[in-house]
Image: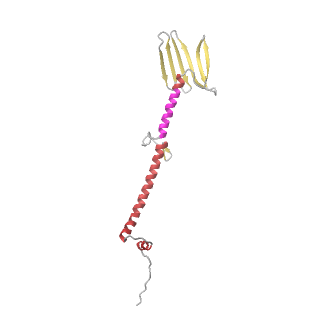
């Protein structure tokens, strides 16, 4: 009877690794192969964590997560730069409105006066585009002068001056 032999070459991954210069034991090689599966899972977890961090960075920077505005339930809602920028803008707008109500002459406007019976009855403040920014209306009683300043946005300020006591009452009304 004759025996046929066939050279299978390197029949295992361990054998191939050894032929390429691997110096560890077969048990160490088996552990390396097992660790590859864990390494793949760890790499996928790291990728997912990086994606989540990128989303959090976007949320904290511009108030959006994946391009959508964060909602009040999102931890980044009141903790992002866009939120604080919006708050500052709203505050500045409020200050600008109050400024326009408090000053006698609004910068960059032209004032037109209306007289009635020798006294000022109205002042209109218009910008360079001829848009009315504020209208002031004056009424006179025996011992009081009332001035109502109304912005084109609806906010108003009423100033009542008592000519006997020289006391002034100022009342603000929002739009």
Q: Is residue 15 left or right of residue 125?
A: left
Depth check: 22 or 166 in front?
22
**Magenta residues (range):** 81-97
Q: In the figure, 24 relative to 112: above or below?
A: below
Give how far across and how far down residue 90 sits, in percent: 50, 33
**83 drawn magenta:** yes
Residue at the (47%, 49%) spot, across then down: 54
Quadrant in the picture for residue 13: bottom left
Q: Is residue 30 left or right of residue 164?
A: left
Q: In the figure, 86 relative to 114: above or below?
A: below
Quadrant in the picture for residue 20: bottom left
| Residue furthest left as drawn | 27
Q: In the figure, 21 relative to 155: above or below?
A: below
| Residue furthest right as drawn | 129
Give how far across and how far down residue 82 sits, in percent: 49, 40
Give how far across and how far down residue 15 sits, in percent: 41, 74
**124 drawn magenta:** no
Q: In the figure, 20 relative to 49: above or below?
A: below
Residue at the (54%, 14%) spot, across then down: 139
């Amino acid at each position: 009877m004759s025996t046929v032999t066939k050279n299978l070459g390197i029949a295992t991954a361990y054998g191939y690794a050894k032929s390429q210069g691997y110096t560890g034991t077969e048990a160490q090689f088996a552990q390396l192969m097992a660790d590859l599966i864990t390494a793949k899972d760890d790499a996928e977890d790291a990728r997912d964590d990086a994606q989540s961090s990128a989303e959090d960075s976007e949320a904290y920077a511009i108030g959006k997560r994946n391009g959508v505005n964060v909602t009040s339930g999102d931890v980044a809602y009141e903790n992002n730069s866009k939120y604080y920028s919006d708050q500052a803008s709203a505050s500045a707008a409020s200050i600008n409105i109050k400024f326009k109500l408090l000053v006698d002459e609004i910068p960059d406007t032209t004032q037109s006066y209306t007289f009635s019976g020798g006294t000022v009855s109205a002042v209109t403040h218009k910008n360079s585009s001829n848009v009315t920014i504020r209208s002031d209306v004056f009424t006179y009683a025996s011992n009081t002068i009332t001035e109502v300043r109304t912005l084109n946005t609806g906010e108003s300020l009423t100033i009542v001056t008592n000519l006997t006591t020289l006391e002034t009452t100022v009342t603000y009304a929002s739009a």
